[in-house]
Image (cartoon, rainbow, N blue to C red):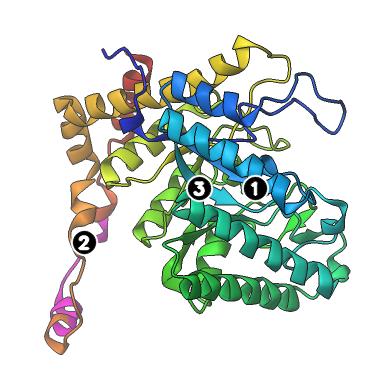
Amino acid sequence: MGDYTPTPADKFAFGMWTIGHPGRDPFGDATRPPIDPVDYVRGLADIGAWGVSFHDDDLMTFGAPESQRRAELDRFKKALSDTGIVCSMATTNLFWHPMFKDGAFTSNDRNVRRLAIQKSMRNLDVAAELGAPTYVFWGGREGVESAASKTPADALDRYREALDFLASYVVDQGYSIRFAIEPKPNEPRGDTFLPTVGHALAFIETLDHADMVGLNPEVAHETMAGLSFYQGVAQTLWQGKLFHIDLNDQKIGRYDQDLRFGSEGIKDDFMVVRLLENSGYDGPKHFDARPYRNENGDGIWDFARGCMRTYLIFREKAKEFDANPKVKQALADAGVPELAIPTVGPYSRATADELLAEKFDPETLASRGYRNEQLDQLVIDTILGA
Ligand code: GCO
Ligand code: MN
Ligand code: MN
């Protein structure tokens, strides 16, 4: 058994808004003080993290004079170079200021839409300066409470227009930045545009620079929609679109909880880690979670260490699972390798005729058992260490 101590080689990253979340919620004020960005970056280095991500407003005071914003950015840059922490992702805050109450790229107010694109362009410049390879688009306010308040096709046209414009800006500036759309079904809006992985994957295909745009799926968001995060990530990988990932946890059917990774949906989380580790995904393992509201001081760093520790435990368990001869036999009994064999191969008149002539015995096919119980029990045994 490993000691589960993370190192930068594990590529664990945290958002500026996560460990340092002050504990404010819709029912109560902050329960802990903000952390200075420099202390935050030092703290990340101390716990063995590799990367940090930020919203423009996390680093540079919104609306402050350019000189102040530059000074704030330079302080942060120095903390990065002092610690070796990498800027792994950047994004725009298009949800906090009251002007975004009707949306940003999809606000009915054209000037709000123009400002949202401008705010994103300015922060893309910062992202490029910090070397962030990925820029996330989470449509926090892109949605409605009243379905009658926006024509969905117009909203999607405006969303696409914004992403096309910004992707062209990136190309024009010569930046090496890819976009990652982060779907979420609701919260803070009653209904959000691009609510799930599936909606977002389909939307990307309509973009001018579809090759530059992938996904940033989040455990909590798919779970809120009642979906399996594992299946969503698997299809995202299959489509070559896993550009980033937001790991946290969530009880199904609840408000957005942003729980410590691996603290709730242990089985799905285990399968996700196994999938990531076996897929060759080499992007950040980014935690978008926050400490319980009743934590402070060292407690918030316990939370951060816990996210990474659980990932590393799952990683070890996944290796153990795949190396176990009983698992290999159970996978064979379940027919898992058989699904990798092409069914009919490419179409030709000959293969079509061959298939048409083939005789099947439905009784024999129906009589097969797939032994999924023993396989799934091995998943449970592995996770529980039995
Ligand atoms: C949420 C989202 C955000 C985004 C972040 C980066 O539910 O609030 O997950 O935390 O990930 O704004 O785009
Ligand atoms: Mn979230
Ligand atoms: Mn997120």
Task: Please provide percent x and percent y for residue 275.
Answer: 34, 41
Q: Residue 361 carries which label?
A: 2
Give the residue number, with chain letter if any, for mark 1: 70
Amino acid type, mark 3: Met
Label 1 near label 2: C-beta < 8 Å? no
Q: In this view, does 319 lie to the left or right of 144?
A: left
Mark 2 neighbour density, 10 Å: few (under 14) some (14–19) many (20 or more): few
Neighbours of disc 3 within 10 Å: few (<14), some (14-19), many (20+)? many
Depth check, mark 2 against mark 1: the one in front is 1
Where's residue 261, x and y in %?
A: 52, 28
Magenta-colored span: 352-364
What residue is at 44 percent from the left and 70 percent from the top?
174
Question: Is 258 covered by the magenta stretch?
Answer: no
| For marks 2 and 3 on the same chain, the one whose residue lies earlier in the sequence | 3
Nearest the viewer among 348 and 29 is 29
Mark 2–mark 3 distance (CA, rounded to whole Å): 55 Å
When the figure is inspected, residue 298 is found, relative to residue 372, above or below; the finding is above
Which is nearer the eye, 345 or 216? 216
Amino acid at pointer 2? Asp
Magenta highlight: main SS: helix
State yes or no: Cβ of the residue under disc 3 lies below 8 Å from any atom of ligand 1: no
| Whole-number angstrom distance, CA of label 3 to CA of label 1 | 19 Å
Q: What element carries label 3?
A: strand
